Image (tube, helix red, strand yellow):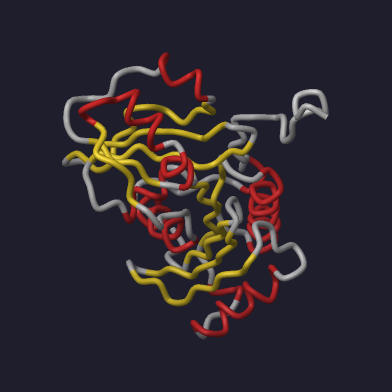
Amino acid sequence: MNTGPLLALEFSTERASVALWQEGQILASREDEGAAPSGRVWSLLDSVLAEARRTWDDLGGIAYGAGPGGFTGVRLACGIAQGLGLGLGIPLFPVSTLECLTEVAPHPRIVVALDARMNQVYLAAYERQDSGWQECLPPRLCSPGDLSGLPDLPAGDWWGAGSGAVAWNTLLTLRWASQWQGTIPGLSPHATHIAALAGQARKRTTGVSPAAAQPIYLRQRVALTRAERGL
């Protein structure tokens, strides 16, 4: 198995980021204003490699935020990862942009919700156990009316993380009542989180081939019609 550095891409939210990880350490990272920096991505990648004093040939794998998230950004990250993986002959490590927030969660029970626009959120729930984070609610696309149909959470105190959790704090409080403890502000998916989770995954798996890599969309529609927007 190639144990060279992992290059991580996260373009699914309003702030794009890239990072380089090796042996439990972030060697370098960069952020860019804009969810899908298609015109600037190569300068971001080159600057991270230069800061870490690594070359493309040193890489041992490519990790990317597979979604759910912004449609264009998720596709861009997957496409770049596939191209680099094919060209360099290295595996890919797709990471859920919901799960990656567990990397910085300060509590053992987290509902991650990211703004999906159109009055919806991407939502999942995770609980830390001895073996690591366990998925309690699989990732899904939710409208406000869907919350009442969600399964109950396991016993214990739960916190929200992500832009959607902050925006829907009142709705989530109503759904899970005494279990809901509020939200953790300021957390959003970042390439450093993607890299760390991919590094853990590389201990258990060899990754996936570039040809097999796929984004996680959860939704095919990316906008409301004029009628739905009341125009």
* Left-right relation of 30 to 86: left
* Left-right relation of 213 to 182: right
Q: Nearer the viewer, residue 48 or 230?
A: 230
Relative to 101, residue 153 above or below:
above
The quadrant the C terminus occupies is: top right
What is the residue that sits farthest to the front in this orientation? Answer: 230
The quadrant the N terminus occupies is: bottom left
Name the residue located 68 percent from the left edge and 56 percent from the top edge.
86
Q: Exactly how many numbered labels are in the figure?
A: 0
Instruction: Give the image location of residue 67, x and y in percent.
Output: 56, 43
What is the residue that sits farthest to the top in this orientation? Answer: 149
* Left-right relation of 177 to 171: left
Name the residue located 56 percent from the left edge and 31 percent from the top edge.
120
Q: Nearer the viewer, residue 113 or 22?
A: 113
Q: Nearer the viewer, residue 134 or 111?
A: 111
Relative to 209, residue 192 above or below:
below
Instruction: Give the image location of residue 142, x and y in percent.
Output: 52, 26
Instruction: Give the image location of residue 106, x and y in percent.
Output: 24, 53
Q: Nearer the viewer, residue 26 or 180?
A: 180
Q: Quadrant of residue 152?
A: top left
Q: Quadrant of residue 36?
A: bottom right
Instruction: Give the image location of residue 191, x and y in percent.
Output: 49, 61
Relative to 180, residue 66 above or below:
below
Name the residue located 62 percent from the left edge and 59 percent from the top edge.
89
